[in-house]
Amino acid sequence: MRQRFVYVLAAALVLWAGGGALGSVGAAQPEMPAAPGETTIAGWSVSCKDFRGHAVTTMRIANLGDVGRAGVINRVPVIAIDPDIIGRLPNKLQLFFYEHECAHHVLGHWFQSSMTMETDADCWAIRQGRDKGIFSRDDVMSFAPFLANSGGSVFGHLPGPQRAKQLLSCFDGQ
Ligand SMILES: [Zn+2]
């Protein structure tokens, strides 16, 4: 089970780093950030640095097929965001997804993956938002209906209702 997970993950990363993603990089619109790693999500100025302290570049990529993804292109850590998908979400949830992708870089998931990396990234994102004063507990509760239809994934996202519950326990934890 674990071996299969690692294989599936590796295949996905290769595809992202070398395949489909590069094909659409020409269409990407890198932000003109105020500082390296800074971008604007739902009107908030946010930034992300990876576990080495390197700035993470945010790119808008149409037809990404997912709200966001974390990856590395030519050794540059990036967060790719589908502007159409994220644009349909409430502001705070947009910020949550951004922080979730950032968490993969902060926690170094590129170099050391684990079965819990999605839940770890969720938790980091929630606590980051809480500690920055972006998320209230009510904000986190408001995410639940949007996660409810999600069925989980081979990459370790919990099914929606469980994921929403886990987010709250992260908010309430240290
Ligand atoms: Zn993730």
Image (cartoon, rainbow, N blue to C red):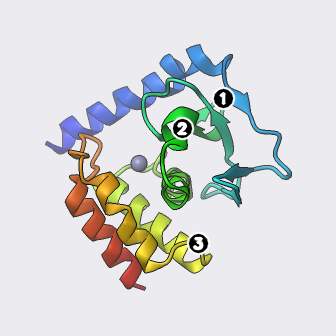
Q: Residue at x 69, y 59 (%)?
A: 46
- Residue highlighted by disc 1: 74
Tell me the number on the disc at residue 134.
3
Q: Pointer 3: residues within 10 angstroms few (<14), some, or many (20+)?
A: some
C-alpha span from label 1 to label 3: 32 Å
Q: Nearer the viewer, residue 113 or 25?
A: 25
Looking at numbered disc 2 in the image, what kind of residue is underneath it?
A: Gly
- Circles 2, 1 touching at the beta carbon (< 8 Å): no
N-terminal of the pair, mark 2 or mark 3, is 2
C-alpha span from label 2 to label 1: 10 Å
Task: Note whether 151 is above or below 64 in the view shown.
Answer: below
Looking at numbered disc 3 in the image, what kind of residue is underneath it?
A: Ile
- Residue highlighted by disc 2: 71
N-terminal of the pair, mark 1 or mark 3, is 1
Q: Position of residue 174 (x, y in %)?
A: 43, 85
Task: Note whether 134 is above or below 122 in the view shown.
Answer: below
**Residue 72 found in image quarter:** top right
* SS category of the residue bearing label 3: loop
Q: Nearer the viewer, residue 121 or 42?
A: 42
Q: Nearer the viewer, residue 101 or 50?
A: 101
